[in-house]
Image (spheres, helix red, strand yellow):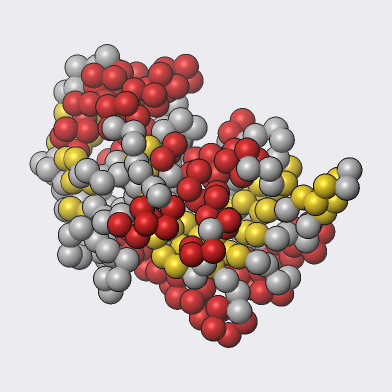
Amino acid sequence: MSKENNKVLVKVLVTGGAGFIGSHVVDSLLDLGYEVVALDDLSGGFTENVNPEATFVEGSINDVDLVNKLFAEHDFDYVFHLAAYAAEGLSHFIKKFNYENNLIGSVNLINASVNHNIKCFVFTSSIAVYGENQLPMKEDLTPQPEDSYGIAKYAVEQELASSLKMFGLPYIIFRPHNVYGEKQNIGDKYRNVIGIFMNQIMAGKKLSVFGDGEQTRAFSYIGDVAPIIAKSIKEPKALNQVFNIGADKPESVNRLAKVVSLAMGGDGEIDHLPARNEVDHAYCDHAKVKEVFNYTADTSLEEGVKKMAEWAKTIGVKSSKEFGHIEIEKNLPPSWKNI
């Protein structure tokens, strides 16, 4: 906590602050009057995403010396941890990379938060922790993650619960799902299906759909998610709780393709690729977040996709970088192989 013109400023660290959800959380925190430091290694984020009112630090949560230096220098009050390589399907094939970035990096932040008496550690987990589970998925279900990404996220959740008991580190955990919107990386063929579709339409390509396209997800607009995450630290009832957050209505990937095509002016032609190993149906119950935060996900799929499409057209086609850390080639979808 620092003082500026006799005004007490609450200092906040946002990891992944140049990324998609992280940059929107930074914006929301600044709107609430917090002083924000955004940390990001730019592996998936972009400097132009970072609000100029925030202090930007380029670096990795795996750099323990840097993490400890930042905590000592800035005397943070709160930590919002959104840094992750969130490629759920790809995580099967990049296990070491996944656990180093999504688990060990998180532990580095938890350690520093305990050592510097952080008031609350806000963590964005994922509905990937549920795996193939009862629908709609509720927070009191026993997690059964089926991929390395979900396993890492759930391990961090357990570490936070343990750190509360052992060290008194308060936390708030959000499990967002299928979030989309402006500032998302549309040039990444491994994740973010709406961005992938938009990029393919602008490039004059068919839309890549794994399997029959009848998988269902509840696609969640960023404007309905980021503000709740940012203001959570002001809600006492949220402390040490886990919340699903996102849209209520599940949609098939086939219907999503039609909605995106309409918004982008494409013909919506689909290229059905071999099915990959993934949960067929995943959507959540949001009774808990509605009760605590008076939360409503008001943005319809059509409205949110339209907003994102208008933004995507301004930035144009983005090329996808090949992921350079593939550790297992067996059963890797052909469209993901480095050629």
| Residue 147 point in image, percent of width and height | 31, 63
The spot of residue 106 in percent (x, y) is 55, 65
Q: Quadrant of the C terminus?
A: top left
Q: Residue at x 26, y 55 (%)?
A: 284
> From the viewer's perspective, is residue 139 above or below residue 86?
below
Q: Please state if 191 lies on the left or on the right of 214 as rendered.
A: right
Quadrant including the N terminus: bottom right
Kindly identify the residue that appears in the image at 35 percent across and 43 percent down: 296
Q: Measuring 49% from the left and 77% from the top, which residue is drawn there?
A: 161
- Residue at the limit of the structure toward the right, as seen here: 5
Does the rendering let one see residue 92? Answer: no
Instruction: Residue lying at the far bottom in this picture: please name it.
Output: 166
Q: Quadrant of residue 205?
A: top left
Residue at left offset 66%, top offset 74%:
114
Query: Residue 324: x percent and y percent?
Result: 46, 48
Measured as percent of width and height from the top left, residue 271 is found at 17, 31
Q: Is residue 238 above or below residue 39?
A: below
Residue 157 visible in this rendered orientation of the protein: yes
Relative to 274, 20 lies left or right:
right
Front one among 313 and 323: 313
- How many numbered marks, from 0 up? 0
